[in-house]
């Protein structure tokens, strides 16, 4: 039989163990929260810095729309600014439209030549982007094309993708120097953005580039893998650390598909 003193000591020992276990769990939770808050804080600072850089690059006459939620992140917009300045593309095709359209058009205007063609499946969003472009006096440098999603089968992919027939009329056999893939939304089809390269590969000029936003997502990573296995004339030249991830591919001087 345990004495009262022995039972008391046993209970105290168990209580100490419980307190230590709770302290350990609480310490882990605090450390995880501290790390999460630190990462979030660093990202917020990085996005603010990128947004300020975008303002410095394009010098808008009035404020830009918000860059949270579905909109392109400031670091992606800043990269577009730098990329256009360095590569000097003349013909830019964008899958989706929005603030990125304005940033591309403003930087094309700085070059003094070129044009941005943006495919947009949502008529309401097309209208908003056109108004945004108009309010910044960039109509000469950008065209937003209504391109509803329609059934498509290409290679072994099937789903809905942009009706790009009106884009073909606008391009008039002009080769694409820069393809920005930021749509359609990932929920519209499995690997929703896959058709972009199969559709435009042969229309892209030698040395042209493909920029994929949201490259941190599993679906986009699979798309990049498939493009790499199917289109040997396009090689991965950059994978950038960004809020949502950015991947850049470059087209070689020879256009061919992998056969194995």
Image (cartoon, rainbow, N blue to C red):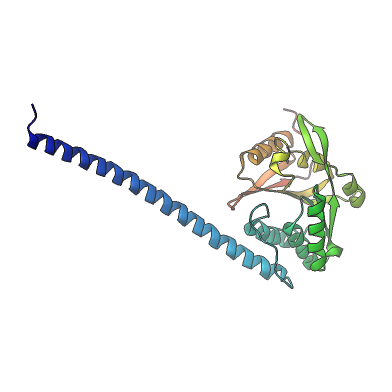
Residue 222 vs residue 130, the one in the foreground? 130
Q: Is residue 215 visible?
A: yes
Classify residue 36 as left or right of residue 172: left
Q: Is residue 92 visible?
A: no
Tell me the residue at 58%/64% (across/down): 48
Spot occupied by residue 175 in the image (x, y as percentages of width and height): 85, 49
Spot occupied by residue 198 in the image (x, y as percentages of width and height): 79, 38
Outermost front residue: 4
Figure check: 157 above or below 208: above
Residue 44 vs residue 91, the one in the foreground? 44
Classify residue 44 as left or right of residue 126: left
Figure check: 16 above or below 30: above
Tell me the residue at 9%/29% (across/down): 2
Spot occupied by residue 241 in the image (x, y as percentages of width and height): 58, 51
The quadrant of the rendering that contains the N terminus is top left
The quadrant of the rendering that contains the C terminus is top right
Outermost bottom residue: 61
Figure check: 165 above or below 107: above
């Amino acid at each position: 039989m345990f004495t009262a003193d022995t039972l008391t000591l046993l209970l105290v020992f168990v209580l100490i163990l419980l307190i230590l276990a709770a302290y350990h769990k609480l310490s882990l939770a605090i450390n995880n929260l501290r790390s999460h808050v630190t990462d979030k804080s660093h990202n917020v600072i990085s996005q603010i810095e990128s947004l300020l850089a975008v303002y410095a690059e394009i010098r808008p006459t009035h404020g830009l729309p918000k860059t949270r939620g579905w909109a392109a992140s400031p670091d992606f917009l800043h990269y577009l600014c730098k990329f256009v300045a360095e590569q000097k593309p003349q013909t830019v095709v964008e899958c989706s439209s929005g603030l990125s359209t304005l940033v591309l058009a403003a930087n094309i205007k700085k070059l003094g030549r070129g044009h941005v063609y943006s495919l947009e499946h949502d008529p309401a969003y097309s209208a908003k982007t056109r108004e945004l472009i108009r309010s910044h006096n960039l109509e000469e440098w950008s065209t937003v094309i209504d391109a509803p999603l329609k059934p498509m089968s290409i290679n072994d992919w099937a789903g809905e993708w942009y009706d790009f027939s009106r884009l073909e009329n606008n391009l008039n056999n002009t080769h694409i120097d820069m393809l920005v893939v930021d749509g359609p939304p990932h929920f519209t089809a499995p690997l929703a953005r896959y058709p972009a390269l199969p559709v435009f590969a042969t229309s892209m000029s030698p040395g042209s580039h493909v920029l994929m936003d949201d490259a941190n997502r599993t679906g986009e990573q699979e798309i990049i893998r498939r493009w790499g296995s199917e289109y040997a004339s396009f090689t991965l030249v950059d994978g950038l650390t960004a809020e949502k991830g950015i991947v850049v591919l470059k087209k070689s001087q020879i256009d061919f598909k992998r056969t194995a």
